Image (cartoon, rainbow, N blue to C red):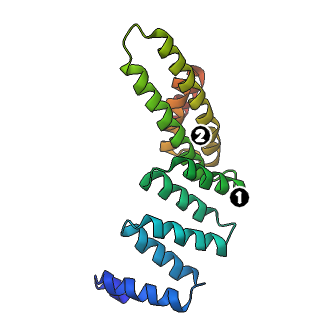
Amino acid sequence: YMSLAAGDTAAYAEWVQKGRAMFPENPDLLRAELQLFFDNKEYDKALANLDQAIAQDPENVVMYYNKGVILQTEMKRLDDALVAYERALEIDSMYSDALYMSSIIYIDSANAIGEKMNALPLNATKKYNALAKEQKAVFQVALPYLEKAKVSNPGDEQVESALMQVYRALKMYDKAKALQEEQQ
């Protein structure tokens, strides 16, 4: 760690690699290597590292969550991210971060459908209505994730903001109003 403190990240990386070779089961070295891979945007290596960490500790909810975040935000592999989040939620069904990030995948998908709706010509009513129905179904999938995340982590502004968006999109104005009053 002295190399890192001195700003010599190459020496630090070398020491972490040597340590991992000597002590492959050491969880601290595994996490240090994971951070290096993430910092260097070596996401395939980070995922392999996470899989090793999961193999060592299959009930570690944070490792599944971290895997989901990399898959979702850095690699745009949304289906794989959902699988990682679902595994985290199998271990801890109220893990707020996994609930929230899962909901974001669905909200982003619903918002993309909204963009398609807005791009339609005014006379494309049938197509618009079909997309609106599809969008509503996606928002309905996001809703339970957010409601559980709110219970799990009350007062989380990101969760409440996303939940407000979903309530409004689903025309659940009474719940949106109650949430807004609760926030004040």
- Label 2: state its secondary structure: helix
Q: Reply above or below: 36 against 114.
A: below
Where residue 3 appears, x then y in whole percent? Answer: 33, 87
Quadrant location of the N terminus? bottom left
Density class for disc 1 (Cα within 10 Å; few <14, some 14-19, many ≥20) is some
Residues at badges 2 and 1 in contact (C-beta under 8 Å)? no
Q: Reply above or below: 107 against 91.
A: above
Q: Position of 184 compared to 150: left or right?
A: left
Where residue 22 appears, x then y in whole percent? Answer: 53, 92
Q: Residue at x 59, y 45 (%)?
A: 154
Residue 177 appearing in the image: no
Residue furthest top in the image: 123
Residue furthest bottom in the image: 22
Density class for disc 2 (Cα within 10 Å; few <14, some 14-19, many ≥20) is many
Question: Which numbered tag is attached to residue 91?
Answer: 1
Residue 110 appearing in the image: yes
Q: Give the distance between the C-alpha atoms of the residues marked 2 and 1, in whole angstroms.
A: 18 Å
Q: Which residue is mark 2?
A: 146
Check disc 2 and give the amino acid type. Answer: Leu
Q: Residue at x 37, y 68 (%)?
A: 39
